Image (cartoon, helix red, strand yellow):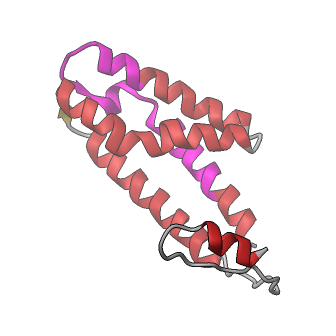
């Protein structure tokens, strides 16, 4: 079979084989810790961003760069693992953020968003990560 394959190749080619190997354990703790660190950094960055008035363009940029990880990707992940209540808390903040964005006005998001609910949901997300890392 290998000879037939080599005959059909144009010019030079690489032929490889697959062999079975023992599965190697992966230390996931550093990955879980990195996720916890990223969530903490994200919470601090969101808090700082929301404390000042922001224009429509800044909000559009922040939507993708700052809020997407938690208000889109986070909601998706929480929904996939069946954490509907936490996902719903984030979805409510997402709805208010999008409403503030649609106004086209300068806004101070800590006056428009329920940041305590957002940070509470992020804490629940961190706790889920901690549970998985044990």
Residue in the picture at 79% in, 83% down: 19
Residue 84 is situated, as x and y percent measured from the top left of the image, at 72, 34
Q: Is residue 85 magenta?
A: no
- Which quadrant of the rendered structure holds the C terminus? bottom right
Report the predominant secondary structure element of the magenta stretch.
Answer: helix
Residue in the picture at 46% in, 45% down: 69
Q: Is residue 113 magenta?
A: yes
Q: Which residues are magenta?
A: 97-126
Residue in the picture at 33% in, 27% down: 111
The residue closer to the viewer here, 120 or 94, is 94
- Above or below residue 11? Residue 42 is above
The number of numbered badges drawn on the structure is 0
- Above or below residue 69? Residue 105 is above
- Above or below residue 8? Residue 75 is above
Question: Residue 53 lies in what quarter of the image?
Answer: top left
Question: Residue 121 lies in what quarter of the image?
Answer: top right
Question: Residue 27 lies in what quarter of the image?
Answer: bottom right
Residue 72 is situated, as x and y percent measured from the top left of the image, at 51, 36
User: Is residue 61 left or right of 44 when viewed as pictured?
Assistant: left
User: Is residue 62 left or right of 89 when viewed as pictured?
Assistant: left
Residue 95 is situated, as x and y percent measured from the top left of the image, at 48, 21
Residue 45 is situated, as x and y percent measured from the top left of the image, at 33, 52
- Above or below residue 112? Residue 65 is below
Residue in the picture at 82% in, 82% down: 20
Direction front: furthest residue: 7
């Amino acid at each position: 079979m290998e000879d037939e394959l080599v005959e059909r190749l144009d010019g030079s080619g690489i032929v490889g084989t697959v062999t079975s190997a023992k599965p190697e354990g992966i230390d996931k703790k550093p990955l879980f810790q990195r996720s916890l660190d990223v969530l903490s950094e994200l919470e601090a960055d969101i808090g700082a961003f929301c404390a000042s008035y922001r224009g429509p363009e800044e909000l559009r940029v922040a939507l993708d760069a700052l809020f997407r990880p938690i208000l889109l990707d986070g909601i998706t992940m929480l929904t996939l693992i069946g954490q509907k209540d936490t996902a719903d808390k984030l979805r409510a903040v997402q709805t208010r953020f999008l409403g503030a964005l649609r106004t086209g006005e300068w806004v101070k998001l800590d006056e428009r968003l329920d940041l305590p609910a957002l940070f509470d949901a992020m804490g629940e997300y961190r706790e889920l990560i901690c549970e998985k890392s044990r």
